[in-house]
């Protein structure tokens, strides 16, 4: 049951990330065509590609953490065995939760609130900057969710089996 739920979450999240990447590729391609072929560069594609890259980087980082493809130092964890290795893994996941909560969610929500109050909009797209910065708390929520899943996997690996 739990594994099926995580698999559905992963499937939807991967589709969303792939859609963002495809949209960014289309924006950059159109920017190249409009600039070098048509001689009239598009004003909005560069900004949209930049904003998409921010979302892809933050949300993709959360997903990479989940599938254990993120950058990490494993010097200590490779030398540990048994219960010490489990405690180390739990400690790392708890640190990820604390960082995500304090920096990404709380800090991100402050930035979103500030840009909303100041009514900041992007130059070319005229999109509220609060929407762009909302990638911070959303990625924080995803990181906390994935860290909680990792804690469950560490403590009760049988819970991940169908």
Image (cartoon, grey):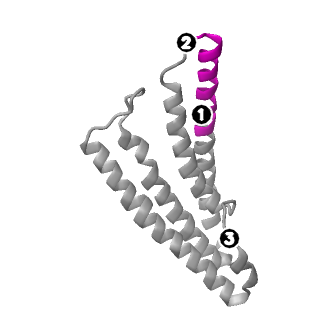
Mark yes or no: residue 1 visible: no
Instruction: Please give the count of numbered marks on the rendered protein.
Output: 3
Q: In which image quadrant can residue 150 be found?
A: bottom right
Q: In which image quadrant can residue 17 be found?
A: top right
Towards the viewer: 53 or 143: 53
Mark yes or no: residue 152 visible: yes
Is 145 situated left or right of 88 in this image? Answer: left
Considering only order in the chain, which callout, 1 or 2, is on the residue closer to the N terminus?
Answer: 1
Residue sitting at x 62%, y 38%: 21
Residue that label 1 marks: 24
Mark 2–mark 1 distance (CA, rounded to whole Å): 19 Å
Which image quarter is the N terminus in? Answer: bottom right
Assess disc 2: are there few (<14), some (14-19) or many (≥20) residues with their C-alpha within 10 Å of its C-alpha. Answer: few
Horizontal and vertical percent for residue 103? 42, 62
Q: What stretch is highlighted in magenta?
A: 20-40
Residue that label 2 marks: 40
Residue sitting at x 61%, y 56%: 63
Is 145 situated left or right of 4 in this image? Answer: left
Residue that label 3 marks: 73
Whether the magenta-drawn stretch holds residue 26 is answered as yes
Q: Which of marks 1 and 3 is in front?
A: 3
Mark 2–mark 3 distance (CA, rounded to whole Å): 47 Å
């Amino acid at each position: 049951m739990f594994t099926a739920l995580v698999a559905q979450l992963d499937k939807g999240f991967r589709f969303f990330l792939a859609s963002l990447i495809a949209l960014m590729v289309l924006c950059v391609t159109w920017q190249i065509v409009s600039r070098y072929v048509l001689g009239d560069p598009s004003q909005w594609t560069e900004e949209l590609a930049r904003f998409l890259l921010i979302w892809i980087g933050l949300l993709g980082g959360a997903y990479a953490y989940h599938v254990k493809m993120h950058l990490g130092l494993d010097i200590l964890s490779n030398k540990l065995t048994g219960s010490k290795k489990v405690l180390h893994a739990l400690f790392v996941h708890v640190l990820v939760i604390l960082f995500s909560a304090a920096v990404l969610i709380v800090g991100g929500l402050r930035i979103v609130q500030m840009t909303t109050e100041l009514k900041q909009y992007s130059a070319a797209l005229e999109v509220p900057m609060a929407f762009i910065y909302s990638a911070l708390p959303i990625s924080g929520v995803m990181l906390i969710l994935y860290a909680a899943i990792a804690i469950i996997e560490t403590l009760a690996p049988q819970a991940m089996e169908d």
